[in-house]
Image: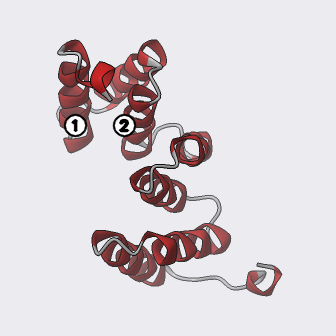
Amino acid sequence: MAKLAGIKPDVNQLKFLCEAGQCLAANNRYNLATEVFQGVIALSPQRAIGYTLLGDATFNMGKYDEALKYHQQAVQVDPDNTFARVHLGEILLFKKQKDKAIAELKKVLEKDPNGPDASFARQLMKASDMGVFNKI
């Protein structure tokens, strides 16, 4: 990654990389997707999106501990990012850490109660109340 020092990608280039990684992930090519997302992080470590997408990819690979780490990093980089926070809540539910998960999901609802991340947070909370995550 040292070769990347000094490279300053613009927002459109980062979007392209994120979309390329998402296409790979959508086609179950998670190993390649994780490499792309690691590149996004290397190019723009101050943005939450790379960490969140890497967390999602590792989550889909069944690597929950790794996914948790990346989602926590995303929230640390950008605490107001509801997209990052709702995905942190999701992985916490999968890891049977319901109290922590609900606290994260409530923060999403407080920050943007009508946004798409709030809708996802409500769905996760409802699924949790129904015991869905107890069966995983």
In the rendered structure, are the residues bearing label 2 and label 1 in contact, judged by CB atoms less than 8 Å apart? yes
Spot occupied by residue 43 in the image (x, y as percentages of width and height)? 64, 75
Question: What residue would you read off at disc 1?
Answer: 120
Q: Is residue 39 above or below residue 134?
A: below
Residue underneath mark 2: 86
Residue at image position (76%, 83%) is 6
Figure check: 42 above or below 60: below
Q: How many marks?
A: 2
Q: How many residues crowd around disc 2 within 10 Å: few (fewer than 14), some, or many (20 or more)?
A: many
Q: Nearer the viewer, residue 39 or 10?
A: 39
> Looking at the image, which residue sits at the far front?
135
Residue 48 x, y percent position in the rendering? 52, 54
Q: Note whether 71 is above or below 103 in the view shown.
A: below
Label 2 to label 1: alpha-carbon separation: 7 Å
Q: Is residue 59 left or right of residue 113?
A: right
Q: Nearer the viewer, residue 73 or 55?
A: 55
Query: Element at badge 1?
Result: helix
Query: Element type at marker 2?
Result: helix
Q: Is residue 57 visible?
A: yes
Q: Is residue 11 above or below residue 3?
A: above
Q: Residue at x 34, y 30 (%)?
A: 108
The quarter in which the C terminus is drawn is: top left
Asked where in the image residue 99 lies, by quadrant, the reply is top left
- Seen from the viewer's position, the closer of residues 62 and 91 is 62
Residue at the far right in the pictured view:
2
Q: Residues within 10 Å of mark 1 (few under 14, many from 20)?
A: some
Amino acid type, label 2: Val
On the image, the x and y values in percent for residue 106 come to 35, 20
The disc label shown at residue 8, or none: none
